[in-house]
Image (tube, grey):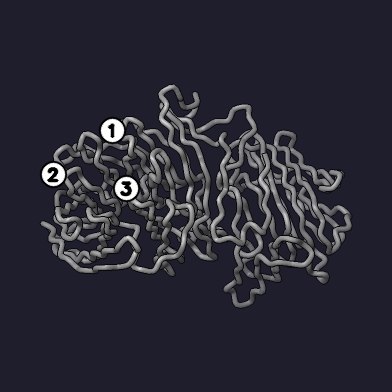
Amino acid sequence: MKTTFLLGALLTATMTLHAAGDNEKRLNGGKLVPIDLTMIESAPHHLNFCFATRFSDGTIYLNHSTGIHTVTEKGCSDISTDNGASWKKATPPVQGINAFETNDGQRRSVACWELETKKDHNLKIISFDRNNRKIDERSVKLSMPYATQCFLHRDIRRTSDGRLFMTGYGHKDGAKKFHNFLLESKDDGLNWNFVSTIAEDPKGEFPEGPCETGIEILGDGELLAVYRVGGTSPMFQKRSSDNGRTWLEAVQIAPYSAAPSLLRMKDGTLVLIAGRPLLYLMVDFTGTGNNWQQTKIYNHPATSSYASVLETTPGELLVIYDESDFGSWRNPSPFHRIMGARFKLVKDDSIKADAGHGPGEYSAKDKKYPEDMNILPVFYKRKSDAADSKATYEIIEIAERPYPVLRVISHGDTRPSMFAHFAAPEYPENISETTVEFEFRLLDADVKTAQFMVNSIVENNGTNWLSWVAFAQDRIVYLNDGKKLDHPYKVGLGFQSFILETDGKAGTYTLFTAKGKQKILTGKLTKSGYPPRMQFGDGTSNVYGAFDLSYINWKYTK
């Protein structure tokens, strides 16, 4: 299979990628089938924390952050009026977090984030009409039976008799760890009352204690709560059969727990989104919370793992998540974007998860492995904020090509990896063969060293292996078992196209001309500490030169 990248496609604000049917995730009792992937937003800065609410007419409110977490971070909003097919920026204070639809069709959000430990807290209630215009804003008092902080998070659920439930968390006065609690409204969300404490950590067993909590009302009327106890700690759930007044013992359900959000679908199936690291969708076809299975949605550490799952039409899910660095400590990346992945969740008792794999962990044995859903890098114009930098990259139109090209100019930047290396998302596991086809031209006539590089990292027998070629005007520099060698070749300054084939099993790679596929050179692979993926950009370690990239595609087989 082949993925083609033409830079002209990147000029649109929203890009939809159709996923291959072979990418379906097989579960016990059904399957998760990818439909498409839409880029909601991209930026030259971090994008994290995706909180979304869908209303009955298909309108979706989305909140996320921009900027480095706790440093330059601020919030922003987006709206979709067509079930997530297209998006536009929203004017504050549109809220997708702690939001719900009122009985008379308004949209309403409830907010409180108070660090002070006290009994009385101020809730901000904002109401909107169906045209997304604010029609009311008020502050109401929440009285707690004890002194605590109050952080509201994040799902609001309605009972069959019209009451609303919402959760919060905070430190009690004198407590070292968080606890979470349940709130209730009987007047469509205009006033709220404390119901109960869901869970505490008086012995300090967990890194944070019970905090971020998702809730849902099950078909038998039971209330189910799932919650986090630490950034990369296990997730627990509790259930209540008396409207949240009392709770049964906690049960561990997953080894990850960041920002869990729980949803009961129209057919009764329960789905749950959570993660860190990576991002997972958990499914329980029985709707009881007793039969969870997991499937990996995003297989890369560059994410906050704060995501939302919505049912857009019966049986169809929209997962909104970020592909971005998170606080400059997880996986620094030059690409930052908010994505919307659409899936069909199919119930079928005859379907079983593949033997030898965890529930939902798909294995394409002895088949050509399809492209991963997260396949295309998204480029944008960016200038370095380093004082001595002359590095830029941007998508531009040129006379020599009928479609835009990616132009990279990197002259001595002090932080090279930020401005001249570009990468596709990681390949699936056990990819040992790849092919990369590309067309480019060198731009800087005064630079005699390599100005453009392509590499491909594959896996064989548990080890990652690197092929690496870089292009100067009069030669090709390539890695051969860890050593850089020169191969005389007239690259010049005009457009040229090549094919790079990497074979992890043979331990070699070969560079060909694209036209006529004439072999240019063969090199031995080099051990790599980086994950399997395709990368391109500068040709030297100190990032020097310039190039136009007009075309690139790649494929991989298992």
The residue type indicated by label 3 comes to: Arg
Q: Nearer the viewer, residue 361 or 115?
A: 361
Image coordinates of residue 312 in percent, x first then y, are 40, 46
Q: Would you call the spot at circle 3 few (<14 residues within 10 Å), some (14-19), or many (20 or more)?
A: many
Residue 113 seen in the figure: no
Tell me the quarter of the image containing the N terminus: top right
How far across and down, in percent of the image, does residue 244 sit? 17, 44
Q: Nearer the viewer, mark 1 or mark 2?
A: 1
Classify mark 1: helix, strand or loop.
loop
Amino acid on which the number 1 mark rests in the picture: Thr
Q: Which residue is mark 3?
A: 228
Q: Earlier in the sequence, mark 3 or mark 2?
A: 3
C-alpha span from label 3 to label 2: 20 Å
Residue at numbered disc 1: 288
Q: Amino acid at mark 2?
A: Arg
Q: Earlier in the sequence, mark 1 or mark 2?
A: 2
Residue toward you, 229 or 285? 285
Farthest-out residue, bottom: 387
